[in-house]
Amino acid sequence: MNNFMFLFSLQPWFFVFLSMLLYMFHVIIYEFHRPSKCSGPPTFPVIGCLVSFYKNQHRLLDWYTELLAKSATKTIVVSRFGARRTIVTANPENVEYMLKTNFNNFPKGKPFTEILGDFLGYGIFNVDGELWRAQRKLVSHEFSANSLKEFVMNTLKDEVENRLLPLLEGIAKTSQVVDLQQLLRRLSFNMICKVSLGVDRCCLDPSSPAPPLAKAFDLASEISARRATEPLFLVWKMKKWLGIGSERRLRNAIDSVRDYVEEIIHIKKMTIQGKGKYCCQDLLTRLILGGEDEQVIRDLTISLILAGRDTTSAAMTWLFWLISCNPEIEQQLIQETKFTKGKTLDYESLKELKLLKACLCESMRLYPPVAWDSKHALVNDLLPDGTSVQAGDRVTYFPYGMGRMEALWGKDWFEFKPQRWFYKNGKPKKVCPYKFPVFQAGPRVCLGKEMAFIQMKYVIASILEKFEIIPVRSDQPVFVPLLTAHMAGGLKVSVRWRDQ
Protein backbone atom coordinates (compact mmCIF):
# COMPACT_ATOMS: atom_id res chain seq x y z
CA MET A 1 0.00 0.00 0.00
CA ASN A 2 2.82 2.38 0.90
CA ASN A 3 4.56 1.63 -2.42
CA PHE A 4 1.34 2.33 -4.32
CA MET A 5 0.89 5.67 -2.54
CA PHE A 6 4.50 6.60 -3.35
CA LEU A 7 3.99 5.92 -7.06
CA PHE A 8 0.71 7.80 -6.98
CA SER A 9 2.42 10.84 -5.49
CA LEU A 10 4.96 10.78 -8.34
CA GLN A 11 2.31 10.05 -10.96
CA PRO A 12 3.09 12.89 -13.44
CA TRP A 13 6.83 12.13 -13.58
CA PHE A 14 6.27 8.39 -13.50
CA PHE A 15 3.99 8.45 -16.54
CA VAL A 16 6.29 10.77 -18.48
CA PHE A 17 9.17 8.36 -17.91
CA LEU A 18 6.99 5.35 -18.75
CA SER A 19 5.78 7.01 -21.95
CA MET A 20 9.35 7.65 -23.08
CA LEU A 21 10.29 4.03 -22.48
CA LEU A 22 7.27 2.76 -24.41
CA TYR A 23 8.03 5.10 -27.31
CA MET A 24 11.64 3.94 -27.48
CA PHE A 25 10.57 0.28 -27.52
CA HIS A 26 8.01 1.06 -30.23
CA VAL A 27 10.66 2.70 -32.40
CA ILE A 28 13.17 -0.09 -31.98
CA ILE A 29 10.74 -2.99 -32.46
CA TYR A 30 8.53 -1.65 -35.26
CA GLU A 31 10.67 0.83 -37.13
CA PHE A 32 14.25 -0.44 -36.93
CA HIS A 33 13.98 -2.68 -40.01
CA ARG A 34 11.95 -0.21 -42.03
CA PRO A 35 13.94 1.05 -45.06
CA SER A 36 15.36 4.50 -44.41
CA LYS A 37 15.19 7.28 -46.95
CA CYS A 38 18.43 8.82 -45.73
CA SER A 39 21.87 7.48 -46.63
CA GLY A 40 23.11 7.51 -43.05
CA PRO A 41 22.51 4.82 -40.42
CA PRO A 42 19.00 4.28 -38.99
CA THR A 43 18.62 6.97 -36.33
CA PHE A 44 15.92 7.30 -33.66
CA PRO A 45 15.03 9.69 -30.83
CA VAL A 46 17.24 9.58 -27.73
CA ILE A 47 19.32 6.54 -28.71
CA GLY A 48 20.29 7.79 -32.18
CA CYS A 49 21.95 4.98 -34.18
CA LEU A 50 23.23 3.17 -31.07
CA VAL A 51 21.60 -0.15 -32.00
CA SER A 52 22.91 -0.28 -35.57
CA PHE A 53 26.31 1.00 -34.42
CA TYR A 54 26.53 -1.79 -31.88
CA LYS A 55 25.46 -4.39 -34.46
CA ASN A 56 28.17 -3.22 -36.87
CA GLN A 57 30.86 -2.49 -34.29
CA HIS A 58 33.01 -5.36 -35.56
CA ARG A 59 32.87 -4.02 -39.17
CA LEU A 60 32.74 -0.25 -38.81
CA LEU A 61 35.02 0.36 -41.81
CA ASP A 62 32.87 -1.54 -44.26
CA TRP A 63 29.63 -0.30 -42.69
CA TYR A 64 30.69 3.33 -43.07
CA THR A 65 31.89 2.63 -46.61
CA GLU A 66 28.53 1.11 -47.59
CA LEU A 67 26.66 4.11 -46.14
CA LEU A 68 28.98 6.60 -47.87
CA ALA A 69 28.61 4.85 -51.23
CA LYS A 70 24.84 5.40 -51.01
CA SER A 71 25.19 9.07 -50.04
CA ALA A 72 24.85 11.64 -52.80
CA THR A 73 27.36 13.89 -51.01
CA LYS A 74 29.65 11.04 -49.89
CA THR A 75 29.12 12.29 -46.34
CA ILE A 76 27.09 10.80 -43.48
CA VAL A 77 26.16 11.96 -39.98
CA VAL A 78 26.42 9.46 -37.12
CA SER A 79 24.55 10.41 -33.94
CA ARG A 80 24.33 7.91 -31.09
CA PHE A 81 23.54 8.02 -27.41
CA GLY A 82 26.59 8.40 -25.20
CA ALA A 83 28.94 9.68 -27.92
CA ARG A 84 29.76 12.88 -29.74
CA ARG A 85 27.98 13.64 -33.03
CA THR A 86 30.26 12.45 -35.84
CA ILE A 87 30.41 13.51 -39.48
CA VAL A 88 32.20 10.98 -41.71
CA THR A 89 33.21 12.09 -45.19
CA ALA A 90 34.76 10.60 -48.31
CA ASN A 91 34.33 13.84 -50.26
CA PRO A 92 37.68 15.34 -51.38
CA GLU A 93 36.27 18.89 -51.27
CA ASN A 94 35.33 18.41 -47.63
CA VAL A 95 38.74 16.90 -46.87
CA GLU A 96 40.51 19.90 -48.42
CA TYR A 97 38.27 22.27 -46.48
CA MET A 98 39.13 20.52 -43.19
CA LEU A 99 42.84 20.01 -43.75
CA LYS A 100 43.67 23.24 -45.58
CA THR A 101 41.02 25.87 -46.39
CA ASN A 102 39.62 26.21 -42.86
CA PHE A 103 42.41 24.37 -41.07
CA ASN A 104 42.17 26.47 -37.91
CA ASN A 105 38.59 25.40 -37.23
CA PHE A 106 39.44 21.70 -37.31
CA PRO A 107 42.16 20.90 -34.75
CA LYS A 108 42.58 17.47 -33.21
CA GLY A 109 40.53 18.78 -30.33
CA LYS A 110 40.23 17.81 -26.67
CA PRO A 111 38.01 14.73 -27.27
CA PHE A 112 40.69 13.23 -29.54
CA THR A 113 43.64 14.14 -27.33
CA GLU A 114 41.77 12.75 -24.33
CA ILE A 115 41.47 9.32 -25.96
CA LEU A 116 45.18 9.13 -26.84
CA GLY A 117 46.52 11.40 -24.13
CA ASP A 118 47.50 8.64 -21.70
CA PHE A 119 49.60 6.93 -24.37
CA LEU A 120 50.94 9.75 -26.57
CA GLY A 121 50.88 12.52 -23.98
CA TYR A 122 52.01 15.80 -25.54
CA GLY A 123 53.56 14.14 -28.59
CA ILE A 124 53.30 15.72 -32.04
CA PHE A 125 50.32 13.59 -33.17
CA ASN A 126 48.24 14.48 -30.13
CA VAL A 127 48.60 18.26 -29.78
CA ASP A 128 47.44 21.41 -31.53
CA GLY A 129 48.51 25.03 -31.79
CA GLU A 130 51.94 26.28 -30.79
CA LEU A 131 53.01 23.02 -29.14
CA TRP A 132 52.36 21.17 -32.42
CA ARG A 133 54.17 23.83 -34.48
CA ALA A 134 57.18 23.76 -32.16
CA GLN A 135 57.52 19.98 -32.36
CA ARG A 136 57.04 19.97 -36.11
CA LYS A 137 59.89 22.44 -36.43
CA LEU A 138 62.08 20.31 -34.15
CA VAL A 139 61.72 17.13 -36.24
CA SER A 140 61.70 18.75 -39.69
CA HIS A 141 65.53 18.50 -39.86
CA GLU A 142 65.21 14.69 -39.95
CA PHE A 143 63.45 14.87 -43.30
CA SER A 144 65.63 17.28 -45.23
CA ALA A 145 67.18 16.04 -48.48
CA ASN A 146 70.62 15.62 -46.90
CA SER A 147 69.18 13.66 -43.97
CA LEU A 148 67.26 11.38 -46.35
CA LYS A 149 70.41 10.65 -48.38
CA GLU A 150 72.26 9.83 -45.17
CA PHE A 151 69.37 7.59 -44.12
CA VAL A 152 69.67 5.59 -47.36
CA MET A 153 73.45 5.27 -47.24
CA ASN A 154 73.71 4.35 -43.58
CA THR A 155 70.60 3.00 -41.86
CA LEU A 156 68.92 1.32 -44.84
CA LYS A 157 72.06 -0.26 -46.23
CA ASP A 158 73.10 -1.61 -42.85
CA GLU A 159 69.70 -3.01 -41.88
CA VAL A 160 68.80 -4.49 -45.26
CA GLU A 161 72.13 -5.67 -46.66
CA ASN A 162 73.70 -6.84 -43.39
CA ARG A 163 70.68 -8.06 -41.44
CA LEU A 164 67.48 -8.58 -43.44
CA LEU A 165 68.85 -10.30 -46.55
CA PRO A 166 71.11 -12.73 -44.64
CA LEU A 167 68.13 -13.67 -42.47
CA LEU A 168 65.99 -14.35 -45.56
CA GLU A 169 68.81 -16.45 -47.02
CA GLY A 170 68.74 -18.64 -43.92
CA ILE A 171 64.95 -18.94 -44.07
CA ALA A 172 65.14 -19.94 -47.75
CA LYS A 173 67.78 -22.61 -47.05
CA THR A 174 65.77 -24.22 -44.26
CA SER A 175 62.36 -23.84 -45.98
CA GLN A 176 60.88 -22.19 -42.90
CA VAL A 177 57.54 -20.43 -42.84
CA VAL A 178 57.89 -16.92 -41.47
CA ASP A 179 55.47 -14.14 -40.52
CA LEU A 180 56.48 -11.44 -43.00
CA GLN A 181 54.42 -8.78 -41.24
CA GLN A 182 56.23 -9.39 -37.95
CA LEU A 183 59.58 -9.39 -39.72
CA LEU A 184 58.87 -6.06 -41.44
CA ARG A 185 57.60 -4.53 -38.21
CA ARG A 186 60.83 -5.43 -36.45
CA LEU A 187 62.83 -4.04 -39.34
CA SER A 188 60.90 -0.75 -39.27
CA PHE A 189 61.22 -0.62 -35.48
CA ASN A 190 64.98 -1.01 -35.75
CA MET A 191 65.22 1.77 -38.33
CA ILE A 192 63.19 4.31 -36.39
CA CYS A 193 65.10 3.50 -33.19
CA LYS A 194 68.40 4.00 -34.96
CA VAL A 195 67.38 7.26 -36.65
CA SER A 196 65.45 8.80 -33.76
CA LEU A 197 67.15 7.37 -30.68
CA GLY A 198 70.57 6.33 -31.90
CA VAL A 199 70.23 2.99 -30.07
CA ASP A 200 70.57 -0.60 -31.12
CA ARG A 201 67.39 -2.53 -31.11
CA CYS A 202 65.69 -5.95 -31.37
CA CYS A 203 66.48 -9.17 -33.20
CA LEU A 204 64.90 -9.36 -36.66
CA ASP A 205 64.14 -13.07 -36.55
CA PRO A 206 60.38 -13.41 -35.87
CA SER A 207 60.99 -16.79 -34.24
CA SER A 208 62.78 -15.04 -31.37
CA PRO A 209 60.66 -13.48 -28.59
CA ALA A 210 59.30 -10.02 -29.28
CA PRO A 211 61.08 -7.34 -27.23
CA PRO A 212 59.09 -6.08 -24.21
CA LEU A 213 58.91 -2.57 -25.69
CA ALA A 214 57.26 -3.85 -28.87
CA LYS A 215 54.72 -5.87 -26.85
CA ALA A 216 53.91 -2.84 -24.72
CA PHE A 217 53.50 -0.65 -27.84
CA ASP A 218 51.12 -3.19 -29.38
CA LEU A 219 48.95 -3.41 -26.29
CA ALA A 220 48.87 0.35 -25.66
CA SER A 221 48.00 1.04 -29.31
CA GLU A 222 45.20 -1.51 -29.40
CA ILE A 223 43.47 -0.47 -26.19
CA SER A 224 43.81 3.26 -26.93
CA ALA A 225 42.24 2.76 -30.37
CA ARG A 226 39.36 0.70 -28.97
CA ARG A 227 38.41 3.55 -26.65
CA ALA A 228 37.04 5.42 -29.66
CA THR A 229 34.81 2.52 -30.74
CA GLU A 230 33.12 1.84 -27.39
CA PRO A 231 29.34 1.98 -27.91
CA LEU A 232 29.11 4.29 -24.87
CA PHE A 233 31.86 6.86 -24.37
CA LEU A 234 31.69 6.60 -20.58
CA VAL A 235 32.60 2.89 -20.55
CA TRP A 236 36.35 3.31 -20.88
CA LYS A 237 36.35 6.33 -18.56
CA MET A 238 34.63 4.33 -15.84
CA LYS A 239 37.10 1.44 -16.25
CA LYS A 240 39.98 3.90 -16.06
CA TRP A 241 38.59 5.51 -12.90
CA LEU A 242 38.15 2.08 -11.28
CA GLY A 243 41.51 0.83 -12.61
CA ILE A 244 40.08 -2.40 -13.98
CA GLY A 245 40.05 -4.50 -17.16
CA SER A 246 41.56 -3.13 -20.34
CA GLU A 247 42.31 0.25 -18.74
CA ARG A 248 44.48 -1.40 -16.12
CA ARG A 249 46.38 -3.29 -18.83
CA LEU A 250 46.75 -0.01 -20.73
CA ARG A 251 48.22 1.74 -17.70
CA ASN A 252 50.78 -1.05 -17.24
CA ALA A 253 51.73 -1.00 -20.95
CA ILE A 254 52.16 2.78 -20.96
CA ASP A 255 54.32 2.59 -17.85
CA SER A 256 56.55 0.04 -19.60
CA VAL A 257 56.89 2.20 -22.73
CA ARG A 258 57.67 5.34 -20.75
CA ASP A 259 60.17 3.58 -18.47
CA TYR A 260 62.03 2.27 -21.51
CA VAL A 261 62.14 5.62 -23.30
CA GLU A 262 63.07 7.54 -20.15
CA GLU A 263 65.94 5.12 -19.55
CA ILE A 264 67.20 5.73 -23.10
CA ILE A 265 66.98 9.49 -22.52
CA HIS A 266 68.97 9.15 -19.28
CA ILE A 267 71.67 7.03 -20.94
CA LYS A 268 71.84 9.48 -23.85
CA LYS A 269 72.34 12.40 -21.47
CA MET A 270 75.21 10.56 -19.78
CA THR A 271 76.77 9.90 -23.20
CA ILE A 272 76.45 13.57 -24.17
CA GLN A 273 78.15 14.62 -20.94
CA GLY A 274 81.07 12.37 -21.80
CA LYS A 275 81.41 13.23 -25.51
CA GLY A 276 79.90 16.72 -25.68
CA LYS A 277 79.47 18.11 -29.17
CA TYR A 278 81.19 15.07 -30.66
CA CYS A 279 78.22 12.85 -29.75
CA CYS A 280 76.34 11.28 -32.67
CA GLN A 281 73.64 13.60 -34.05
CA ASP A 282 70.46 11.52 -33.93
CA LEU A 283 67.15 13.25 -33.20
CA LEU A 284 67.19 12.45 -29.49
CA THR A 285 70.66 13.96 -29.09
CA ARG A 286 69.59 17.16 -30.83
CA LEU A 287 66.50 17.45 -28.66
CA ILE A 288 68.56 17.08 -25.49
CA LEU A 289 71.25 19.51 -26.65
CA GLY A 290 68.48 21.96 -27.56
CA GLY A 291 67.36 22.03 -23.94
CA GLU A 292 63.88 20.64 -24.58
CA ASP A 293 61.70 19.61 -21.64
CA GLU A 294 62.16 15.91 -20.81
CA GLN A 295 58.42 15.16 -20.95
CA VAL A 296 58.18 16.71 -24.42
CA ILE A 297 61.21 14.67 -25.53
CA ARG A 298 59.67 11.48 -24.16
CA ASP A 299 56.23 12.01 -25.71
CA LEU A 300 57.63 13.11 -29.06
CA THR A 301 59.88 10.05 -29.15
CA ILE A 302 56.96 7.70 -28.39
CA SER A 303 54.91 9.29 -31.20
CA LEU A 304 57.72 8.91 -33.73
CA ILE A 305 58.36 5.27 -32.81
CA LEU A 306 54.66 4.49 -33.17
CA ALA A 307 54.43 6.12 -36.60
CA GLY A 308 57.72 4.84 -37.97
CA ARG A 309 57.26 1.30 -36.74
CA ASP A 310 53.77 0.40 -37.90
CA THR A 311 52.79 2.43 -40.96
CA THR A 312 55.52 1.40 -43.41
CA SER A 313 55.49 -2.24 -42.30
CA ALA A 314 51.71 -2.39 -42.83
CA ALA A 315 51.96 -0.89 -46.33
CA MET A 316 54.73 -3.31 -47.33
CA THR A 317 52.88 -6.33 -45.92
CA TRP A 318 49.75 -5.61 -47.95
CA LEU A 319 51.80 -4.95 -51.09
CA PHE A 320 53.52 -8.35 -50.86
CA TRP A 321 50.10 -9.96 -50.50
CA LEU A 322 48.66 -8.07 -53.48
CA ILE A 323 51.54 -8.78 -55.86
CA SER A 324 51.38 -12.47 -54.91
CA CYS A 325 47.81 -12.35 -56.26
CA ASN A 326 48.97 -10.52 -59.41
CA PRO A 327 52.05 -12.37 -60.74
CA GLU A 328 52.18 -10.32 -63.95
CA ILE A 329 52.68 -7.14 -61.90
CA GLU A 330 55.29 -8.89 -59.79
CA GLN A 331 57.26 -9.73 -62.96
CA GLN A 332 57.11 -6.09 -64.08
CA LEU A 333 58.45 -5.01 -60.68
CA ILE A 334 61.29 -7.51 -60.93
CA GLN A 335 62.27 -6.12 -64.33
CA GLU A 336 62.22 -2.57 -63.00
CA THR A 337 64.26 -3.62 -59.97
CA LYS A 338 66.87 -5.43 -62.11
CA PHE A 339 67.27 -2.33 -64.26
CA THR A 340 67.92 -0.19 -61.21
CA LYS A 341 70.07 -2.78 -59.48
CA GLY A 342 72.53 -2.40 -62.33
CA LYS A 343 73.34 0.86 -60.62
CA THR A 344 74.02 1.61 -57.01
CA LEU A 345 70.75 1.59 -55.09
CA ASP A 346 71.03 5.11 -53.72
CA TYR A 347 68.79 8.12 -53.11
CA GLU A 348 68.69 9.09 -56.80
CA SER A 349 68.19 5.62 -58.28
CA LEU A 350 65.31 4.93 -55.88
CA LYS A 351 63.40 7.76 -57.57
CA GLU A 352 63.46 5.75 -60.81
CA LEU A 353 61.34 2.97 -59.28
CA LYS A 354 58.14 4.55 -60.56
CA LEU A 355 56.14 1.36 -60.97
CA LEU A 356 57.05 0.32 -57.43
CA LYS A 357 55.85 3.67 -56.09
CA ALA A 358 52.60 3.26 -58.05
CA CYS A 359 52.15 -0.21 -56.55
CA LEU A 360 52.68 1.17 -53.06
CA CYS A 361 50.13 3.94 -53.68
CA GLU A 362 47.64 1.43 -55.05
CA SER A 363 48.19 -0.85 -52.06
CA MET A 364 47.68 2.05 -49.63
CA ARG A 365 44.56 3.15 -51.53
CA LEU A 366 42.96 -0.20 -50.72
CA TYR A 367 44.62 -0.77 -47.34
CA PRO A 368 45.71 2.60 -45.88
CA PRO A 369 48.06 2.42 -42.86
CA VAL A 370 45.75 4.92 -41.12
CA ALA A 371 42.15 4.08 -42.01
CA TRP A 372 40.56 7.28 -40.68
CA ASP A 373 41.48 10.48 -38.88
CA SER A 374 39.29 12.86 -36.90
CA LYS A 375 39.23 16.55 -36.09
CA HIS A 376 36.83 18.48 -33.85
CA ALA A 377 35.12 21.68 -34.95
CA LEU A 378 35.78 24.75 -32.79
CA VAL A 379 32.76 26.70 -34.06
CA ASN A 380 29.71 26.06 -36.22
CA ASP A 381 30.65 25.57 -39.86
CA LEU A 382 29.38 24.43 -43.25
CA LEU A 383 31.25 21.89 -45.38
CA PRO A 384 31.46 22.47 -49.15
CA ASP A 385 28.87 19.74 -49.83
CA GLY A 386 26.34 21.56 -47.63
CA THR A 387 26.72 19.41 -44.50
CA SER A 388 26.15 21.49 -41.38
CA VAL A 389 28.83 21.20 -38.68
CA GLN A 390 28.11 22.10 -35.07
CA ALA A 391 30.76 23.29 -32.63
CA GLY A 392 32.25 20.22 -30.94
CA ASP A 393 31.32 17.79 -33.71
CA ARG A 394 33.85 15.13 -34.59
CA VAL A 395 34.59 15.41 -38.32
CA THR A 396 36.29 12.33 -39.75
CA TYR A 397 37.90 11.99 -43.15
CA PHE A 398 38.08 8.39 -44.23
CA PRO A 399 40.94 7.15 -46.48
CA TYR A 400 39.74 3.54 -46.32
CA GLY A 401 36.30 4.45 -47.63
CA MET A 402 37.67 6.98 -50.13
CA GLY A 403 39.76 4.26 -51.75
CA ARG A 404 36.54 2.32 -52.34
CA MET A 405 34.39 5.04 -53.85
CA GLU A 406 33.38 4.38 -57.47
CA ALA A 407 32.89 8.13 -57.91
CA LEU A 408 36.60 8.69 -57.20
CA TRP A 409 38.28 5.63 -58.73
CA GLY A 410 35.84 4.17 -61.24
CA LYS A 411 33.92 0.93 -61.46
CA ASP A 412 37.15 -1.05 -61.13
CA TRP A 413 37.99 0.49 -57.74
CA PHE A 414 38.19 -3.00 -56.18
CA GLU A 415 41.00 -4.07 -58.53
CA PHE A 416 44.70 -3.74 -57.78
CA LYS A 417 45.72 -1.66 -60.82
CA PRO A 418 49.00 0.29 -60.47
CA GLN A 419 48.49 1.66 -64.01
CA ARG A 420 45.77 3.96 -62.67
CA TRP A 421 48.66 6.03 -61.26
CA PHE A 422 50.06 6.72 -64.77
CA TYR A 423 48.88 8.73 -67.75
CA LYS A 424 48.50 6.92 -71.07
CA ASN A 425 51.92 8.19 -72.12
CA GLY A 426 53.50 6.44 -69.14
CA LYS A 427 54.18 9.53 -67.04
CA PRO A 428 53.21 9.28 -63.35
CA LYS A 429 50.02 11.11 -62.36
CA LYS A 430 49.99 13.73 -59.65
CA VAL A 431 46.92 12.64 -57.71
CA CYS A 432 45.19 15.23 -55.55
CA PRO A 433 46.28 14.66 -51.91
CA TYR A 434 42.70 15.33 -50.76
CA LYS A 435 41.50 12.44 -52.91
CA PHE A 436 44.29 10.24 -51.55
CA PRO A 437 44.95 11.57 -48.01
CA VAL A 438 46.93 8.61 -46.63
CA PHE A 439 49.69 11.01 -45.57
CA GLN A 440 47.20 13.71 -44.53
CA ALA A 441 47.54 16.98 -46.47
CA GLY A 442 47.72 20.71 -45.89
CA PRO A 443 49.69 22.12 -42.91
CA ARG A 444 49.73 18.76 -41.09
CA VAL A 445 50.91 16.70 -44.06
CA CYS A 446 53.19 13.89 -42.90
CA LEU A 447 56.79 15.06 -42.63
CA GLY A 448 58.00 11.49 -43.05
CA LYS A 449 56.23 10.84 -46.37
CA GLU A 450 59.39 10.94 -48.48
CA MET A 451 61.36 8.88 -45.97
CA ALA A 452 58.58 6.28 -45.88
CA PHE A 453 58.63 5.86 -49.68
CA ILE A 454 62.43 5.62 -49.71
CA GLN A 455 62.42 2.97 -47.00
CA MET A 456 59.66 0.91 -48.59
CA LYS A 457 61.21 1.07 -52.07
CA TYR A 458 64.64 0.04 -50.82
CA VAL A 459 63.32 -2.88 -48.76
CA ILE A 460 60.90 -4.23 -51.39
CA ALA A 461 63.34 -3.85 -54.30
CA SER A 462 66.07 -5.63 -52.34
CA ILE A 463 63.79 -8.53 -51.45
CA LEU A 464 62.20 -8.96 -54.89
CA GLU A 465 65.54 -8.94 -56.65
CA LYS A 466 66.72 -12.01 -54.72
CA PHE A 467 63.69 -13.83 -53.34
CA GLU A 468 60.22 -15.09 -54.13
CA ILE A 469 57.75 -14.40 -51.32
CA ILE A 470 54.97 -17.00 -51.36
CA PRO A 471 52.05 -16.63 -48.93
CA VAL A 472 50.94 -19.94 -47.46
CA ARG A 473 47.38 -18.70 -46.92
CA SER A 474 44.82 -18.68 -49.71
CA ASP A 475 41.97 -16.84 -47.99
CA GLN A 476 41.43 -13.08 -48.04
CA PRO A 477 43.30 -11.45 -45.13
CA VAL A 478 41.40 -9.30 -42.66
CA PHE A 479 42.23 -5.59 -42.38
CA VAL A 480 42.41 -4.38 -38.75
CA PRO A 481 42.53 -0.56 -38.36
CA LEU A 482 43.31 0.41 -34.70
CA LEU A 483 45.71 3.41 -34.43
CA THR A 484 47.64 2.06 -37.39
CA ALA A 485 46.38 -0.78 -39.53
CA HIS A 486 47.69 -4.32 -39.74
CA MET A 487 46.81 -7.70 -41.22
CA ALA A 488 45.01 -9.93 -38.73
CA GLY A 489 47.12 -12.97 -37.91
CA GLY A 490 50.09 -11.69 -39.89
CA LEU A 491 51.25 -12.84 -43.32
CA LYS A 492 52.80 -16.30 -43.16
CA VAL A 493 55.09 -16.89 -46.16
CA SER A 494 57.70 -19.24 -47.50
CA VAL A 495 60.85 -17.77 -49.05
CA ARG A 496 62.64 -19.10 -52.14
CA TRP A 497 65.64 -17.92 -54.10
CA ARG A 498 64.50 -16.01 -57.17
CA ASP A 499 66.58 -18.17 -59.56
CA GLN A 500 64.86 -21.35 -58.31
Image (tube, rainbow, N blue to C red):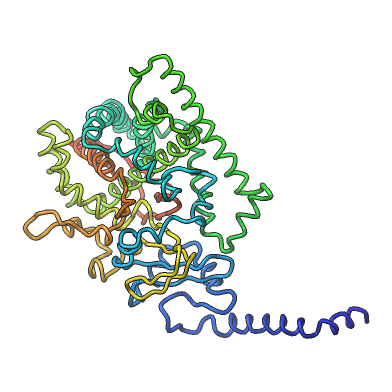
Viewer-nearest residue: 4 or 133:
133
**Residue 40 to residue 325: above or below:** below
- Residue 382 in view: yes
Which residue is located at x 65 percent, y 55 percent? 238
Which residue is located at x 60 percent, y 49 percent? 246
> Which residue is outermost to the right?
1
Looking at the image, how many numbered discs can be counted on the residues?
Answer: 0
> Which residue is outermost to the top?
274
Which residue is located at x 21 percent, y 33 percent? 146
Q: Position of residue 429 (x, y in %)?
A: 15, 57
Side of 492 relative to 414 (left or right): right
Of the 4 image quadrants, the one containing the N terminus is bottom right
**Residue 46 to residue 92: above or below:** below
- Residue 173 in view: no
**Residue 7 to residue 147: above or below:** below
Of the 4 image quadrants, the one containing the C terminus is top left
Side of 55 relative to 424 (left or right): right
Side of 240 relative to 419 (left or right): right
Q: Which of the 4 image quadrants contains residue 432?
A: bottom left
Q: Position of residue 180 (x, y in %)?
A: 35, 41
Viewer-nearest residue: 471 or 250:
250
Which residue is located at x 30 percent, y 31 percent? 164
Q: Position of residue 10 (x, y in %)?
A: 82, 81
Q: Which of the 4 image quadrants contains residue 259?
A: top right
Viewer-nearest residue: 450 or 200:
450
Q: Position of residue 167 (x, y in %)?
A: 32, 29
